[in-house]
């Protein structure tokens, strides 16, 4: 979902929110990345909260222009391999980050959903263990959650765990998964790093562009 940022210089940032309209320095990944697949789990009930997350009004994905353009170059390299990027999440409104914090404070009401996404943790543990951050690079337009899939069928490459499966098996360099799953994770990481994205070690799917286009801002316009 997002990298743990507590203990870093990001804690002291003065966060600002933008207008309700899409920020002019953000662009659609569908436009910037030819053939990319947009899934955006938080725009549906198929996510760890079981709810459509506030701010996700459409199954669309946006990032700050430099991030989107860099991702477009990654997508081009993936297409040359017969693959495509599939986007689980990109820009995330501040209101969604606040929603996750509020959700973590509520009693557990859906054990079946917990078993799918975070079987070994309580809701509040997800913050304490660094799987969810109180301030996210997603809201700065620099982060993306994604995987690789077959370009023609859309079938995901096997990464050894699902998106937002909060467990040590989702750590990028976990060695308890199969050789094929390790190979697929390394391929995704190599493609992303080739265009300046850095992986968050606890989540094989999470990458942030470095340097960030808006390191001192966060935005709250809706995705629509």
Image (cartoon, rainbow, N blue to C red):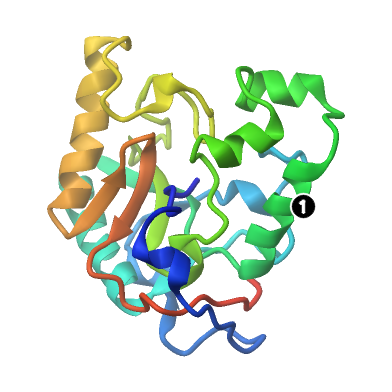
| Residue found at x 41% / y 86% | 25
Secondary element under disc 1, as helix, strand or loop, is helix
- Vertical position of residue 218 compared to residue 192: above or below: below
- State the count of labels: 1
Residue 56, x across and y down, in percent: 68, 62
Q: Is residue 81 visible?
A: no
- Vertical position of residue 216 compared to residue 107: above or below: below
116 relative position to 135: left or right = right
* Mark 1: few/some/many CA within 10 Å (<14, 14-19, 20+): few
Q: Which corner quadrant of the image does residue 75 belong to?
A: bottom left
| Residue found at x 43% / y 21% | 168
Q: In the image shown, does 203 or 224 lie closer to the viewer?
A: 203
Q: In the image shown, does 77 or 135 lie closer to the viewer?
A: 135
| Residue found at x 38% / y 46% | 206
**Which residue is under mark 1?**
102
| Residue found at x 42% / y 30% | 155
Q: Which corner quadrant of the image does residue 35 belong to?
A: bottom left
184 relative position to 18: left or right = left
Residue 62, x across and y down, in percent: 48, 69
Q: Which corner quadrant of the image does residue 114 belong to?
A: top right
Residue 82, x across and y down, in percent: 22, 39
- Vertical position of residue 184 compared to residue 57: above or below: above
Q: In the image shown, does 7 or 107 lie closer to the viewer?
A: 7
On-image quarter of the C terminus: bottom right
Q: Is residue 48 visible?
A: yes
Residue 115, x across and y down, in percent: 68, 18
- Vertical position of residue 97 compared to residue 87: above or below: below
């Amino acid at each position: 979902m997002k990298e743990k940022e507590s203990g870093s210089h990001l804690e002291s940032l003065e966060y600002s929110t933008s207008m309700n309209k899409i920020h002019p320095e953000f662009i659609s990944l569908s436009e910037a990345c030819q053939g990319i697949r947009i899934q955006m789990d938080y725009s549906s009930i198929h996510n760890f909260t079981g709810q459509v997350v506030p701010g996700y009004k459409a199954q669309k994905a946006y990032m700050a222009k430099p991030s989107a353009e860099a991702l477009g170059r990654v997508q081009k390299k993936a297409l040359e391999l017969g693959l495509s990027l599939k986007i689980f999440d990109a820009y995330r409104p501040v209101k969604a980050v606040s929603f996750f914090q509020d959700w973590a404070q509520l009693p557990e009401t859906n054990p079946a959903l917990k078993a799918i996404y975070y079987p070994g943790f309580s809701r509040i543990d997800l913050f304490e263990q660094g799987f969810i951050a109180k301030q996210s690079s997603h809201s700065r337009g620099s982060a993306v959650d994604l995987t690789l899939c077959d370009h023609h069928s859309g079938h995901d490459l096997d990464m050894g765990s699902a998106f937002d499966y909060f467990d040590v098996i989702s750590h990028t360099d976990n060695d308890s998964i199969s050789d094929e799953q390790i190979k697929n994770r390394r391929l995704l990481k190599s493609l992303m790093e080739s265009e300046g994205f850095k992986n968050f070690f606890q989540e094989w799917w999470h990458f942030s562009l470095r340097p960030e286009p808006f390191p001192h801002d966060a935005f709250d316009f809706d995705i629509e």
